[in-house]
Image (cartoon, grey):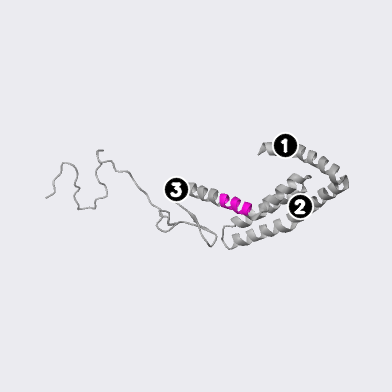
Amino acid sequence: MGLLFLLLPPAEVILGIKLAKAFGGWWVLAGLLGGAVLGSMLIRLRGQAFFRKAMAAMQRQEMPAEELVGGIAWYVAGALLIFPGFISDVLALVVLLPPVRRRVLNRFRRQAEEQLVRMNGGAAFQWTSQGGWQTPQGSQASGDVFEGEGREIIEDAPRLADTTAQPGEREIGPGSRRD
């Protein structure tokens, strides 16, 4: 990925020079300015709309994965259009294709599910059709939390006398007989 960012500017310059020789410098300059204007409009209008939808989904206590991925895709596409060059413009159009966004969304969901499982001690989570995460039926993670204390009982260890016996009761311990 780093190599892409390293090679993109020289490739954009070379392609720009070839296009300027073929179609004229003014047309290339007009295309670059038009891409920058379109990119800034995408960021301003569509990107912000997706983030407003994400906020509304969070207020409804739903996972806004689709809205966030969509909003980020529009922002990335807008930034690629603003970046001067025609290769970045083509990349921006690829980012906006619905199959590409769906693939990124599915990857985001899978990574979020793996993170939830890690955070919850191996309990399984599933993405529901209503747009939220929940444990599947019969899973160990039921959501109930119980507080308590516990102690380990070692069978071979010597035992101390029970101090919880009530007055008048006789303690039964090792070596004593019950009548």
Give the Cα distance between marks 3 and 1. 42 Å
Q: SS for tag 3? A: loop
Displayed quadrant of residue 53: bottom right
The percent position of residue 156, horizontal first and vertical second, equals: 24, 38
Neighbourhood count class around disc 1 (C-alpha, 10 Å): few under 14, some 14–19, many 20 upward: few
| Circle number at residue 122 | 3
* Residue pictured at 75% horizontal, 49% vertical: 81
- 121 horizontally vs 73: left or right: left
| Circle number at residue 7 | 1
Q: Which region shows up in magenta?
A: 99-108
Q: SS for tag 2? A: helix
The correct choice, above or below, for 57 with respect to 176 in the image is: below
Give the Cα distance between marks 2 and 3. 43 Å
Question: Mostly what secondary structure, the magenta segment?
Answer: helix
Residue designated by label 2 = 39
Closer-to-camera residue (12/178): 12
| Circle number at residue 173 | none
Closer-to-camera residue (51/177): 51
Q: SS for tag 1? A: helix
Closer-to-camera residue (38/62): 38
Give the Cα distance between marks 2 and 1. 22 Å
The percent position of residue 140, horizontal first and vertical second, equals: 40, 53
